[in-house]
Image (spheres, rainbow, N blue to C red):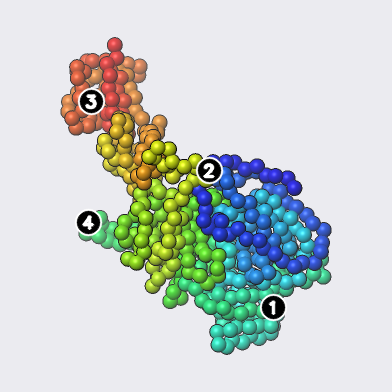
Amino acid sequence: MNQIRLSTTKRFASASGIALAVMLGAGAAPALASTIHPPSTLRANVVGAKVLSMRGVVVARNIARHSIVVSSPAGVVRTIRLQNARDVRKVRIGSDVTARSIALGDGTFHARSLETTGRAQRAKVRGTVVKSLGRDIVLSAGGSVFALRDRSNSTSTRSAGHFESTSALSGSSLVPGDVVEATVSYNQGSGSESSGQLSTIQQLGQTGTIGLDGVLSSINTGASTSATTGTTTTATSITIAVDQGALTTVSIPPSISLPSTIAVGDRVEVIASYANQAFSLITIKDDSLAATETGQGTSQSGSIGDQTVEAEGYVVTANATTLVIQPGDGATSVSFSIPTTLTVPALSSGSQVHATGTLVGGVLTLTSVIVQQPEGDQGQQGNQSSLGATEVNGTASTVSTTSLVVQPTGTGAPVTFAVPTGFSLTDVVAGGAVDATGDLVNGVLTLSKAEVPDSARVSVSGTVTTLNTTTLIVQSSDSGVSTTFSVPANFAFGTIAVNTKVDAKGTLVGSVPVLTSITLND
């Protein structure tokens, strides 16, 4: 079997990925084996990533998402991402497959190889009901939403919380949040692919947490009026088209802002709470970015019906009552309420963590948090230990000799860096763009690099035509064009005066260059 070599960058150990290191199995009729070897274009962080062996029955495909849904004999469902639509089309529903895969941060898997070994007679599937469509049901399980079809005409009964059917569902007996176990039969005598026939179903319980994936079909907005800020328009809900075009509307709590990079038409992953016949957003992420990340993401517990949510990423806010984690690019931050009964280690902005929480009265409540070490870390050097680099691109909101606060571009909480003694921030100005990098040193996110993007830099060589405590105007020696700089308070010009030839540099704040340095040009 060919070995697939993937791109490599530093990653953090994933507690959820390790927990998902399971062997799936399935009985199948013997058939000629075939193997898919995806090419090595995965951009995920995979240094030290565990390659897991899985075996099960393909119960659904999503060609647009480049994924298949595989279920074990116990009904445990996993989503396996392939390289492209062509590879997905090669895998028939009802096939028995063996995969070697890498766990991604969102709880799905990236296949390094996939082998078809036969055809299954039946498959067991455990999932959570998203919608009932006639006699068919749409389920959420293993990071996917997919439909199980039932085209027969038999009837169904339900008693004492136990719902059974010899074939049909009639649709009205199941509601979103119902946790079910279904059996799907496959017609091996058919020469063409069949999606299978739903033959039995049992209701096992209910859950208030449901994962969704699909296409963002609309962002619904509303206006609010404040005496201080005036009228503002914010997103109040989203509508997602899941399997078979079923539309699901999810309300957005006021505390959550959609990532600026997500737009209508994008494929997204959502984790939502469900209560009183309504979905409410917990987190949303761009699915294309989730497919490339192993060290960051948000996922549900592997146990169907469990209301546990796991988030892996860096800390943006940590105090006595709240922990907010940013689980990678293209995602909303995830906020956990910290109960008074839980002892949480001291956390700094930028710490890489794996947090687990569960819904309590509709509030995602922290149950555990683990500060993560980078894989391959050689331990401490002297009295310093690094938990990996944190990079933030955005706007400097506070600049001082001791701290730099950066507001990330798009959405997200400000990130605070401690500035080491002697570190120069000459070109960084409050309100200007900055690319900052820091490392955790003794639990404190400490600045190691701060650069102003070239697009925000202004430089001119010429003659000073105006100079006072607030304004510097320099006429270029080359073009004759004058550039006006805003002068920071207490800026020292030394011997520089009007008619002096100088080299002046500044950083844009909005459209105005703020002077950062000036030297004589003899």
Q: Amino acid at mark 4?
A: Thr
User: Going by the picture, which residue comes out furthest to the top?
Assistant: 522
Mark 3 / mark 2, whichever is N-terminal: 2
Secondary structure beneath label 2: loop
Q: Nearer the viewer, mark 1 or mark 3?
A: 1
Find residue 228 and name its label: 4
* Residue in the picture at 24% in, 31% down: 486
Which residue is label 1 attached to? 199
Mark 1 / mark 3, whichever is N-terminal: 1
Residue 79 lies in what quarter of the image? bottom right
Q: How far apart are the two marked residues, 1 and 4, measured between alpha carbons? A: 60 Å
Q: Amino acid at mark 3?
A: Leu
Secondary structure beneath label 4: loop
Mark 1 / mark 2, whichever is N-terminal: 1
Q: Tell me whether the residue at label 4 lies in contact with that at label 3, contact meaning CB atoms closer than 8 angstroms.
A: no
Q: How far apart are the two marked residues, 4 and 2, measured between alpha carbons? A: 51 Å
Mark 4 / mark 2, whichever is N-terminal: 4
Q: How far apart are the two marked residues, 3 and 2, measured between alpha carbons? A: 52 Å
* Residue in the picture at 44% in, 45% down: 387
Find residue 376 and name its label: 2
